[in-house]
Image (cartoon, coloured by chain):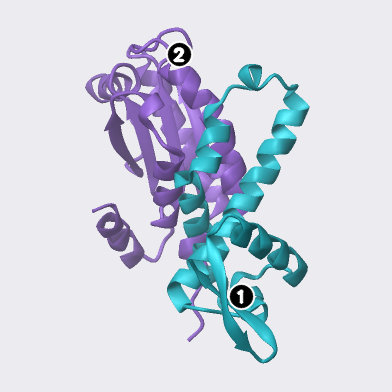
């Protein structure tokens, strides 16, 4: 996958992330209302933004190419497989993706 | 429409930055207007988009401009406390930190996005900002979307 394509995937994912309810909720709240200090707020915001962009990269890839295994997703999204599995578990818990059979002894995931 | 503008730029060999400036209707757009009527000279690299308030600018606007090939994005609004809608610019100031963070996360230089306060009487400041930003972007080089060559 070319550098340009990787960059486009990341940008598209971040645009989708900013459309998502989770990120909009966090960025739309003032830290005063959340009753936490600046440092903690920034830390939470950083991790949510990173997670949301990466999760939208995964859902974007599944939307584009159909059901895929962890290995195929790791190749396409340029994410570490262990991190990818964490995101997949979170997405499955939220009902965003489901498992559909197996391929080369790996689970195939698709959008729910 | 914005994409068509970039296509024209691509035809030229020499790098000329394309800057998208989102200006609020009440202060910065009037400032840009004043820069024109006062005959202040500034580069023609800027494409001004008028919005009613900087509070209207979604992070998506900035990210999409960069994705579509803009080399820099300027967000210009009223000075803090002068917003026509009371707190639109404060909302933007807060949101801008998130925009910078997102741009950095993607892998684009955060210096490509800028937030400035320009009042309706600051035509000179607007012209200076465009001159300065154009020079900065020229140093940075083209947007990675334009500079990365596709393998043949």
Q: Nearer the viewer, residue B69 or B101?
A: B101
Q: Nearer the viewer, residue A102 or B61?
A: A102
- Colour in which chain B is shown? purple
Q: Residue furthest bottom?
A: A104
The residue labelled by disc 1 is A73
Q: Position of residue A78 (x, y in %)?
A: 65, 70
Label 2 chain ID: B
User: Relative to residue A99, is residue B149 drawn left or right?
Assistant: left
User: Relative to residue B45, is residue A33 drawn left or right?
Assistant: right
User: Relative to residue A22, is residue B45 drawn left or right?
Assistant: left
Q: Position of residue A29 (x, y in %)?
A: 56, 26
User: Which of the two marks, 1 or 2, is nearer to us in this view?
Assistant: 1
The residue labelled by disc 2 is B79
Q: Is residue A85 visible?
A: yes
Q: Which chain is cyan?
A: A
Q: Residue at x 27, y 55 (%)?
A: B5
């Amino acid at each position: 996958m070319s550098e340009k394509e990787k960059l486009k995937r990341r940008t598209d994912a971040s645009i989708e992330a900013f459309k998502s309810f989770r990120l909009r909720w966090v960025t739309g709240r003032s830290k005063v209302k959340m009753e936490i200090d600046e440092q903690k707020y920034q830390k939470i915001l950083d991790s949510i933004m990173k997670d949301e962009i990466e999760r939208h990269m995964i859902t974007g890839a599944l939307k584009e190419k159909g059901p895929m295994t962890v290995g195929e997703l790791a190749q396409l999204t340029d994410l570490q497989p262990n991190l990818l599995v964490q995101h997949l578990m979170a997405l499955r818990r939220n009902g965003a993706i489901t498992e559909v059979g197996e391929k080369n002894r790996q689970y195939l995931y698709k959008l729910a | 429409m914005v994409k068509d503008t970039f296509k024209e730029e691509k035809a030229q060999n020499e790098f000329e930055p394309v800057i998208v400036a989102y200006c609020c209707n009440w202060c910065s757009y009037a400032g840009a207007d004043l820069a024109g009527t006062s005959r202040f000279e500034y580069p023609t690299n800027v494409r001004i988009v008028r919005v009613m308030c900087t509070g209207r600018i979604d992070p998506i606007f900035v990210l999409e401009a960069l994705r579509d090939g803009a080399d820099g994005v300027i967000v210009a609004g009223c000075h803090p406390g002068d917003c026509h809608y009371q707190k639109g610019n404060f909302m933007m100031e807060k949101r801008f930190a998130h925009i910078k963070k997102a741009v950095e996360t993607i892998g684009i230089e955060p210096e490509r996005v800028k937030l400035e306060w320009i009042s309706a009487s600051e035509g000179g400041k607007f012209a200076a900002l465009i001159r300065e930003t154009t020079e900065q972007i020229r140093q940075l080089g083209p947007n990675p979307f334009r500079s990365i060559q596709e393998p043949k």
